[in-house]
Amino acid sequence: MSKRVAVVTGGIGGLGTPMCRTLHDQGRSVAAAYYPAEEDKAIEWRKQQLSDGYDIAIYPVDIGDYDSCAALVEKIENDLGAIDILVNNAGITRDAPLKKMEKSNWDAVIQTNLTGAFNMAKQVFDKMAQNGWGRVINIASVNGQKGQFGQTNYSAAKAGLHGFTKALAQEGARKGVTVNTISPGYVGTEMVMAIPEKVRDQIVAGIPIGRLAKPEEIARAVGFLADDEAGYITGADFSINGGIYMH
């Protein structure tokens, strides 16, 4: 049996990298999708992965553009085969209180973080169903559950992923395709570590476990949901937030 093919959008980022590695460790053929403007970074990223023993393919895509997503999937299918596992991880922030938020920043976040998941799932879901096996894993956020000041766009998009996931899960349930979300809290990525230490300390003080998540802890959940034996889990959300929000 050929290797299952996994695609991780935002695959070269702080969360995407351990996700790609985790899936690779499971024996998957892994493709990391990156934003086209980051081509130089992606090339260096691939070199680093290879030196660490991870043969992960890289592909450019504008996740908010439907045609770009269609072209990405066609290229991966030609190179690696039909896509079995989709991790919708790509996302952006454009934070501001509503009174100061530009419409362009609302549109950009919704288009990337919510419509992007549709753009990708639309390309692969029917083929997964026809093949009788598939995994769609949408990376949401604790702020899509509890809301966050200055993030009406981001919180709305991530909350939308929960509804998208639960509805699509019902379409795939009888066809061997599971659809789930993971809602991380604050993770010790480069982006979070760049926050001023004083502010970061305040964030950590509000987390019951008392620390930031490690990116690998989020990736471990991706690997769990992508496993062949996770077929009875669908329409679910995995909250990985150190207890900062319990529901």
Image: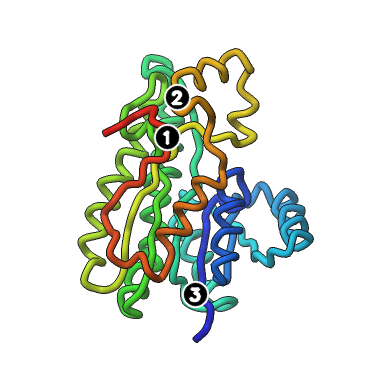
Q: Quadrant of residue 79?
A: bottom right
Judged left or right of residue 48, residue 163 is left
Q: Secondary structure at mark 2?
A: loop
Q: CA distance from mark 3 to mark 1?
A: 29 Å
* Location of residue 105 with respect to 125 vertically, above or below: above
Disc number placed over residue 4 in the picture, else none: 3
Q: Position of residue 18 (x, y in %)?
A: 59, 52
Mark 3 element type: loop
Q: What's the distance in space between the residues labelled 2 and 1, CA to CA?
A: 8 Å
The nearer-to-camera label among 2 and 3 is: 2
> How are the colours assigned in the image?
rainbow
Q: From this viewpoint, which residue is outermost toward the front?
A: 209
The mark closer to the camera, 3 or 1, is 1
Q: Is residue 27 or residue 36 the one in the foreground?
A: 27
- Tell me where residue 240 sits by quadrant: top left
The residue at 52%/45% (across/down) is 217
Circle 2 is placed at which residue position? 207
Dot label at residue 241? 1
First reached walking from the N terminus: tag 3 or tag 1: 3
Give how far across and how far down residue 130 sits, in percent.
Answer: 31, 79
- Residues at circles 2 and 3 in contact by the CB criterion of under 8 Å: no
